[in-house]
Image (cartoon, coloured by chain):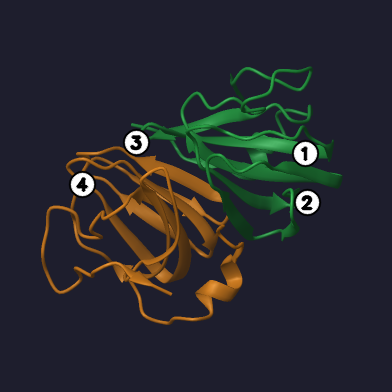
Chain colours: A green, B orange
Amino acid sequence: MAEKVNLEEKFSLFGEHWRPKVVGELNGQEVKLVKLLGPFTWHHHEDADELFLVVKGRFRMEFRERQVWLEEGELMVVPRGVEHRPVADEEAHVLLFEPSGTLNTGNVRNELTAPEAQV
Amino acid sequence: MAEKVNLEEKFSLFGEHWRPKVVGELNGQEVKLVKLLGPFTWHHHEDADELFLVVKGRFRMEFRERQVWLEEGELMVVPRGVEHRPVADEEAHVLLFEPSGTLNTGNVRNELTAPEAQV
């Protein structure tokens, strides 16, 4: 039986940015926590819709044609295939929900590409 | 393209308890918001793991052998097949992640059984 997860406590256990930590799994999906700072990489996920929920701070999700600011307590689903780039001017704490094994940089491999890790 | 969802705003749009509102969908899963008050029904979900994230307030998840208090900013996954009963002494606002079409009372049908609804 899974134990409960306290988000603030889990976020306190790591400092690095853009490296998602798996804190839960259900129905073939994973719940991950990630700290955002600065601009990420333009990418898309071929087979994965991706949910972003802001736990602390704010960031903007850039798309090729528009951008959406996400504030604390706001969530957004980025559908599969849609190019996006998260950008955080100040550190933001974000919960992700996506299929197990989803790579953070999607179709791109670069210095920001990170394997999944536990926290 | 999905729009962002502000949780507080969505919760302000309905008052009834135990009737989940779908606010997002991804990868065959749904994001739902629900207000809890009082004791729910003992039930389980045959084929669905279910995530509970407390957005406001607190409640306890009762299992046959123990109970777990969930506070604001805490989440828990209840695995498929595990009998559970959420109980809220005061109103709690909760976000759910579960497979699309999951019925709130699982294997049970009674006066608390509610069809999924949009908010």
Which secondary structure, mark 1?
strand
Q: Which mark is residue A27?
A: 3
Q: Position of residue B50 (x, y in %)?
A: 34, 46
Task: Give the mark, 2 or 1, whose residue is nearer the N terminus.
Answer: 1
Tell me, yes or no, whether the two marked residues, 2 and 1, touch with CB atoms within 8 Å: yes
Task: Please tell me how crowded label 1 is: few (under 14), some (14-19), or many (20+) other residues with Cα within 10 Å.
Answer: many
Secondary structure beneath dot 2 equals strand
The structure residue drawn at horizontal position 60% and vertical position 43%, both measured from the top left corner, is: A82
Lateral position of residue A90 relative to residue A14, left or right: right
Q: In the image, is residue A3 above or below residue A88?
A: above
Q: Amino acid at mark 4?
A: His
Identified by mark 1, the residue type is: Leu
Q: Which residue is mark 4?
A: B45
Q: Amino acid at mark 2?
A: Phe
Determine which residue is flagged by label 2.
A59
Between label 2 and label 4, give the one nearer the viewer: 2
Q: Chain of mark 3?
A: A
Q: Determine which residue is flagged by label 1.
A: A36
- Tell me whether marks 2 and 1 sit on the same chain: yes
**Residue A111 in the figure: left or right of residue A83:** right
On whether disc 1 and disc 3 are found on a single subunit, the reply is yes
Task: Using a 10 Å C-alpha cutoff, classify the residue at mark 2 as few (fewer than 14 neighbours), some (14 to 19) or many (20 or more).
Answer: many
For the residues marked 1 and 3, what is the alpha-carbon distance in whole angstroms? 26 Å
**What chain is tagged by disc 4?**
B
Three-letter residue code for mark 3: Asn
